[in-house]
Image: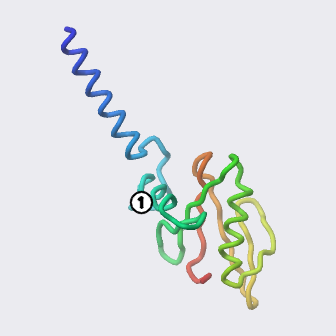
Amino acid sequence: MKKVGFILGIALGMIAVFIFVNKLYYPSLPIENVSAKEAIDQLKESESKIAEIAVEGDSIWYITRSENKGISIADETIKQMIGSNGWEFKEKDGAGLFFEKDGRRLIATTQMWTSNYVLVKIPGDFK
């Protein structure tokens, strides 16, 4: 009986390590074919505070850290990235950040994914 318990303990430990390493404890992403581990790894490997994780239709998905458990720092990161492409920030309304350039309007939509990460969806023609 002790042998069965020991083997069961080893098996459960291996499953826990697998879940931890692959970041399966995070909620699923609203993006197909991108895992939580891939998204977080892309951000960690990025030289900036924001990383592109997927192109889906006419939109580009990014991930950034929320830091301090608040989205306001993520907002500043998004404003800097989009602003560096000539867009002028106009206002924030709910989860949307509104920008203007040459009479056009762009909306970047944010989504708190976890307490540490924010997902951002931006129309692909902002660059």
Residue 71 horizontal side relative to residue 38, left or right: right
Q: Residues within 10 Å of mark 1 (few under 14, many from 20)?
A: few
Residue 105 horizontal side relative to residue 90, left or right: left
Residue 18 horizontal side relative to residue 73, left or right: left
Q: Residue at x 74, y 73 (%)?
A: 98
Measured as percent of width and height from the top left, residue 61 is found at 53, 67
**Residue 5 lies in quadrant:** top left
Count of numbered circles in the view: 1
12 shown above or below 73: above
| Front residue (pair 107, 20) | 20
Measured as percent of width and height from the top left, residue 71 is found at 70, 54
Give the residue number, with chain letter if any, for mark 1: 34
Q: Residue at x 26, y 28 (%)?
A: 11
Residue found at the far right of this picture: 90
Residue 83 horizontal side relative to residue 35, left or right: right
41 shown above or below 86: above
Residue found at the far top of this picture: 1
Q: Amino acid at mark 1?
A: Val
Measured as percent of width and height from the top left, residue 106 is found at 69, 78
Q: Residue at x 65, y 65 (%)?
A: 109
Measured as percent of width and height from the top left, residue 45 is found at 47, 62
**Residue 93 lies in quadrant:** bottom right
- Which quadrant would the N terminus be assigned to in this image? top left
Dot 1 falls on a residue whose secondary structure is loop
- Which quadrant would the C terminus be assigned to in this image? bottom right
